[in-house]
Image (cartoon, helix red, strand yellow):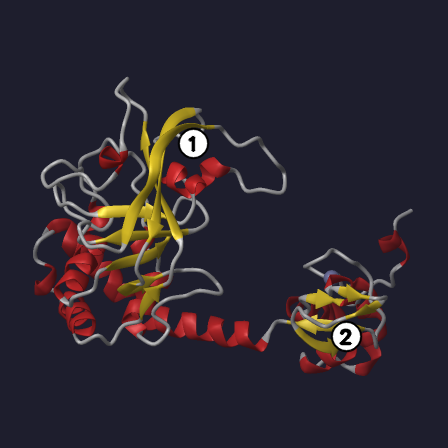
Amino acid sequence: MFYEDFLPILSKAAEKFRERAQKKLKYCITCQPYDGGDYIWFHGEETTIDDILDSVGCPERYREDISGHLHCPNCGKSGFEQYETAGTEDRYIIEEEKKISRVLRRYSEKLEDFRKHLEEYPSLALNHYLGRKLLKEIENRRVDSINLNSTSWSRARIVNQSKVFNSNDMHAPELGLSEGGRFHHPGQSVLYLADSDRLAMEEAINNPNESTLVWIQKFAQINVITDILDLRYEWNNMGQKSNEIMYALLISRYIFEKVIDRNNKWRPQYFITTFIADCARKAGFNGILYSSSRSYGENLVLFNPNNSFVASHGNPKVIIYEVPKPNKYDADLTSIF
Ligand SMILES: [Zn+2]
């Protein structure tokens, strides 16, 4: 017999209230961190099951029975008492979700139209209302920028020849040599860096399911990197919160659109991002900080690789990128490529 077998059967009406209450219930006491036997409320807004049922208009007569049927979606605890402490979603998260749906309602169709327009006319961004608006916002500096304090950075290149690379080989490719990328046009010389060796490697490899030899060069940051356009998309570090259209670009994920086959020369996924990079360059920004679309962490592109923000640290080393072992708690790495 299972615990559930002893629960009172809910009427259709009660079931409706159970569903509504279950949607609101996000955390419980078990989810909270403990300090010397006492919990410290940390996740969600502290309330009780009874208050949650009250907030969905549940009549008193159903409440006790429904409580037993509820479970905590965060830790899996099942069965609550009517007056037990529980948690609803953080107010901050609710506000953020409201903002996201408002901004998407306003901009998602327009952005889709802009994306299609660029796919047909890649160099006519300013022929589209959103292209003009984005340039104006960025040029007038109504966007979020960031200064980066000393951190170390890494760059990776796949080992594809027997030549031993030195630090110069690991710096930005000279004018005319590079393939196009997310924030630069083919041949343009820019320096892409990642905030860890691991991320640099993950950004450089072509196939995450094949072990690969990779050159890694560390870079030391020698000066504060000023005037960086902030395109981070992380729950705690989100760029462009103060600019709606830029925020819409981030949450609609056009900035992070993936190129599935890197050998394909047609990459419309980069048309919005190279346009944003051109706008940022014109506005005098030194580069862009953005969240990785392949893995976890932050990438930086510096528009002028010759300025003195970073310097090679030591010589490059060859390391082996190993295919991560499957772990049921981790998302499959291939799923993000
Ligand atoms: Zn819980």
Q: Position of residue 186 (x, y in %)?
A: 14, 42
Q: CA distance from mark 2 to mark 1?
A: 45 Å
In front here: 333 or 160?
A: 160
For the residue labelled by badge 1, is the local secondary structure a helix, a strand or a loop? loop
- Looking at the picture, which amino acid does disc 2 mark? Ile
- Are dots 2 and 1 in contact, CB under 8 Å? no
Look at 67% across and 66% down and name the residue there. Answer: 26
Badge 2: few (under 14), some or many (20 or more) residues near its Cα, within 10 Å? many
Quadrant of the image occupied by residue 284: bottom left
Look at 19% across and 54% down and name the residue there. Answer: 307
Badge 1: few (under 14), some or many (20 or more) residues near its Cα, within 10 Å? many
Mark toward the start of the polypeptide (2 vs 1): 2
Residue at mark 2 = 49
Look at 65% across and 71% down and name the residue there. Answer: 44
Q: Position of residue 1 (x, y in %)?
A: 91, 46
Residue at mark 1 = 208
Whether residue 205 appears in this view of the structure is no
In front here: 210 or 149?
A: 149
Whether residue 57 appears in this view of the structure is yes
- Looking at the picture, which amino acid does disc 1 mark? Pro
Q: Nearer the viewer, mark 2 or mark 1?
A: 1
Q: Position of residue 289 (x, y in %)?
A: 32, 58
The quadrant of the picture occupied by the C terminus is: top left
